[in-house]
Image (spheres, coloured by chain):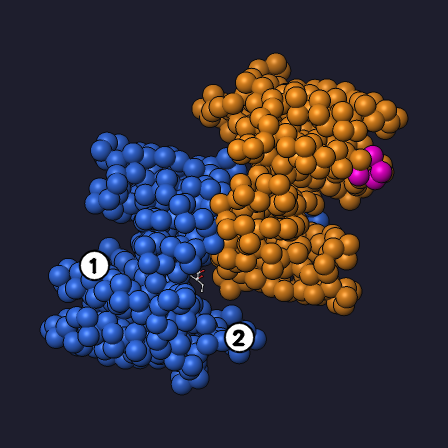
Chain colours: A orange, B blue
Amino acid sequence: MKIAILPGDGIGTEIVAEAVKVLKVLDLPFEMETAPVGGAAYEAAGHPLPDSTLALAKAADAVLFGAVGDWKYDTLERRLRPEQAILGLRKELGLFANFRPAICYPELTHASSLKPELVAGLDILIIRELTGDIYFGQPRGRRTAVDGHFPGSEEAFDTMRYSRPEIERIAHVAFQAARKRNRKVTSVDKANVLETFQFWKDVVTEVHAQYPDVELEHMYVDNAAMQLVKAPKKFDVVVTGNMFGDILSDEAAMLTGSIGMLPSASLNAANQGLYEPSHGSAPDIAGKGIANPLATILSAAMMLKFSLNQPEAAARIEAAVQSVLSQGLRTADIYSEGTRKVSTREMGDAVVAAL
Amino acid sequence: MKIAILPGDGIGTEIVAEAVKVLKVLDLPFEMETAPVGGAAYEAAGHPLPDSTLALAKAADAVLFGAVGDWKYDTLERRLRPEQAILGLRKELGLFANFRPAICYPELTHASSLKPELVAGLDILIIRELTGDIYFGQPRGRRTAVDGHFPGSEEAFDTMRYSRPEIERIAHVAFQAARKRNRKVTSVDKANVLETFQFWKDVVTEVHAQYPDVELEHMYVDNAAMQLVKAPKKFDVVVTGNMFGDILSDEAAMLTGSIGMLPSASLNAANQGLYEPSHGSAPDIAGKGIANPLATILSAAMMLKFSLNQPEAAARIEAAVQSVLSQGLRTADIYSEGTRKVSTREMGDAVVAAL
Ligand SMILES: CC(C)[C@H](C(=O)O)[C@@H](O)C(=O)O
Ligand SMILES: CC(C)[C@H](C(=O)O)[C@@H](O)C(=O)O
């Protein structure tokens, strides 16, 4: 089995190095091969997702991804910007199912913006459709408006769209995930305004007929943004489109107060997957050795479970992370009085030791 | 001067009645005329926005709107559903500038989900573009996919779009509003993915050249959803498109913990406006006399200030609301121990008495 290691930009290299260290001590039968991606790949090869990197990712059983992006690339034309690499990987590998858990660890509840009683024990799974919607819909671009409020003026436009099979497959993923949890799915839409999401709602309702043991609730996206703040623990599995999922999964992650702890997985129909921390490349702290590697290490655990069929090894990593937290070790982002502040590398070493 | 009073559905009639009572004691030279809207209008006239209601709204200097919607209309075809009334009014009156303050009253800080230090003194103004974007873009509908992941399958689609003049005028509104506040505008986009919002970002940046005294910051919508939770007080004026504004303004309103207190205004180029509470029709508590009328009363104050050129009367209403809060009067939604729980009508009477 083969893992493609794509560290990327900013803190990406530092946090991925710790996850690789953890994977190595498990002594499992897989190979790892590293390639540049994002700004690093643009510097090295003139493109954020060079052919060789894409070929490696396609050939691998799983991709462990750090993070991409830096302000210094903001002025590049769009197709050369670091984030095109992640969009390209999602599209080329067909990674339509994005799993983003929002979990509040007991030791870190205090770090949340929310009152502790609202987030203690929080465990939501946001399932975001990742290869459709307005992210990839055609046509898009600039043109002269022919109708609307100002015909004749310059305008820009994008196309939101979902086809029946796209909605069906992500709905199945959500209902099946809910069966392993608390058997409740909240499907988030904007059916009162958008044709695309009226269709979404209709198709999710149809698929639900095959899962009578799972409760299905429909919620408008504006209301979901509110209910996440008001009573996040009422959610179990949330399923939504690419654009709404982008917004709501980040909102939910921030509710926990410890986004540095949150992994993510993006899977295709063959369970090939890309695994990355929920946080970004944080160029402001890159190279300082203070980033939290735990989200990446937990992403490696998701990878072992979902794509590499090593659930025991995944559970061992999760237990090791739990143990370093219980020991009171904290990187700067989750530090609080009475705990011990450690560097990126010390945190990785501590997880290795706990294994 | 003429005010169209459109109470609507659910708690709409109860809360608007209190605002009308407050407006009457001011003894100002304007007429009020009431018409049905939403589900109530569908029942009465077979359409959520009957021609007579639309004509009244168009002829008036301002519209005081309650709320629309009830689950019982969920099965109607889309064009007959209550929310089409509000979309129709926005479109027909050209109400492109939506002002949604998110304010945390000192007396109600404890009601927020967030820790008090994060929201105490919160005062954000979200300015949402209200007549463009994917809400009204054409074409939209269902069709057979010709490309994408599943060509040949059924799909639904919508068009996101913004023209240059649409972005320019809302940007001017935002910069001018910021001049009366803390001179900071956060423009929220998704320029890294959407053509529409790359254009949005470019045009807002151009308009900013005319406001060198105002600070402009650009933020991706996913990050904005996070920063609102993490550090809401860092925002002053937020300006964004119709879809992102729908989500973020509701998120911001819920952060305050007292959405029953938050007014809103939707203005056109002639300062004709529609004023409504930020909360919805709450059919679950309709008719019980327990809804909070203060958001509607404060919307009437915004109306006096923005559309009826009566800033002193507006200030008197705001002071009266502040005074009933200081007296410890609370409707059920904002009640806490040690305060006095009052009904919708008692709250309206208390504001009248304070005037
Ligand atoms: C970088 C960007 C294109 C990306 C997205 O919008 O999907 C990011 O926000 C994410 O959520 O992974
Ligand atoms: C009712 C609905 C169409 C509306 C919207 O999406 O604009 C509402 O959510 C709002 O924010 O006023």
**Magenta stretch bounds:** A311-315
The percent coordinates of residue A26 (x first, y second) are 83, 27
> Dividing the picture into quarters, in which one does residue A345 lie?
top right
Residue B211 position in % (x across, y down):
23, 35
Residue B320 lies in what quarter of the image? bottom left
Chain ID of residue with mark 1: B
Identified by mark 1, the residue type is Phe
Helix, strand or loop for disc 1: helix
Q: Which residue is mark 1?
A: B306
* Furthest residue in direction top, as rendered: A44
In the rendered image, the residue lying farthest to the bottom is: B44
Q: Position of residue A82 (x, y in %)?
A: 56, 26
- The residue pinned by badge 2 equals B71
Instruction: Compare marks 2 and 1 and give the one earlier in the sequence.
Output: 2
The crowd level at tag 2 (other Cα within 10 Å; few <14, some 14-19, many 20+) is few
- Residue B151, numbered label: none
A339, above or below A344, in the image: below
